[in-house]
Image: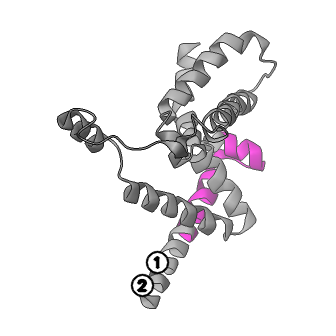
């Protein structure tokens, strides 16, 4: 069971990183959310009724999304525990060396904002692609499907799925380069 769940860990971590807002990362790391999801999946596996890998992936995704919703309810929907209510500790409150260590490990707010903006630009660029390209990029890069699974989904061979994905990535790269060039020209 551990090996099976470990196989999906990077997929779930990718989902968790996309789903957890900046405010919640201060409360729960995406890797902790994945760990909790794995524990629940292991506990509830006897009730899993699916037969295919795609059904297992969807089941794990739903458990993870439910955990994200629980986090949002717990920390963003409350007054006293609300993540937005938190204040940062200063050196007077704790040992400044410890604070420096913690600050070095966490991304700075500007880095988080840049990362969020890049994700937004990427999603916008993907949405501007033709439908078939959008689908293959989402399946491969966002849902971490294998080319065989993509081929099954699109009713083509794994090799055809790989070639379609390569063309989609090429188009996506061109789109992002064009967007960046036009942004520099307007600045």
| Rendered view: 57 above or below 163 | above
Under tag 2, what secondary structure?
helix
Which quarter of the picture shows residue 67? top right
Q: Are marks 1 and 2 in contact (CB under 8 Å)?
A: yes
Which quarter of the picture shows residue 91? top left
Q: Position of residue 170 (x, y in %)?
A: 53, 67
**Residue extent of the magenta highlight:** 149-171
Left or right: 167 as drawn, with respect to 186: right
Left or right: 92 as drawn, with respect to 121: left
**Residue 70 image label:** none
Q: Quadrant of the N terminus?
A: top right
Extreme residue in the bottom direction? 185
Label 1 and label 2: CA atoms lie apart by 6 Å
Asked if the magenta segment contains residue 158, the reply would be yes
Q: Quadrant of the C terminus?
A: bottom left
Secondary structure character of the magenta stretch overall: helix
Which quarter of the picture shows residue 60? top right
Name the residue that disc number 2 marks. 184
Q: Residues within 10 Å of mark 1 (few under 14, many from 20)?
A: few
Q: Position of residue 128 (x, y in %)?
A: 67, 71
Q: Residues within 10 Å of mark 2 (few under 14, many from 20)?
A: few
Name the residue that disc number 1 marks. 180
**Residue found at x 75% / y 9%:** 46
Left or right: 164 as drawn, with respect to 105: right
Between 1 and 21, the residue placed more toward the observer is 21
Extreme residue in the right direction? 49
């Amino acid at each position: 069971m551990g090996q099976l769940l470990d196989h999906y860990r990077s997929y779930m971590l990718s989902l968790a990183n996309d789903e957890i807002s900046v405010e919640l990362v201060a409360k729960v790391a995406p890797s902790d959310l994945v760990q909790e999801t794995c524990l629940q999946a292991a506990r509830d596996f006897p009730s899993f009724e699916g037969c295919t890998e795609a059904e297992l992936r969807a089941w794990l995704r739903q458990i993870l999304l439910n955990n994200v919703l629980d986090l949002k309810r717990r920390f963003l929907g409350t007054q006293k525990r609300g993540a937005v209510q938190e204040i940062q500790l200063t050196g007077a409150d704790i040992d400044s060396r410890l604070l420096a260590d913690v600050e070095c490990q966490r991304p700075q707010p500007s880095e988080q904002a840049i990362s969020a903006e890049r994700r937004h630009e990427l999603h916008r660029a993907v949405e501007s692609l033709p439908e078939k390209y959008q689908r293959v990029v989402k399946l491969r890069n966002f849902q971490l499907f294998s080319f065989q699974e993509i081929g099954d989904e699109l009713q083509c061979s794994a090799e055809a799925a790989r070639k379609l994905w390569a063309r989609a990535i090429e188009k996506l790269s061109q789109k992002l380069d064009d967007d960046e060039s036009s942004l520099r020209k307007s600045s």
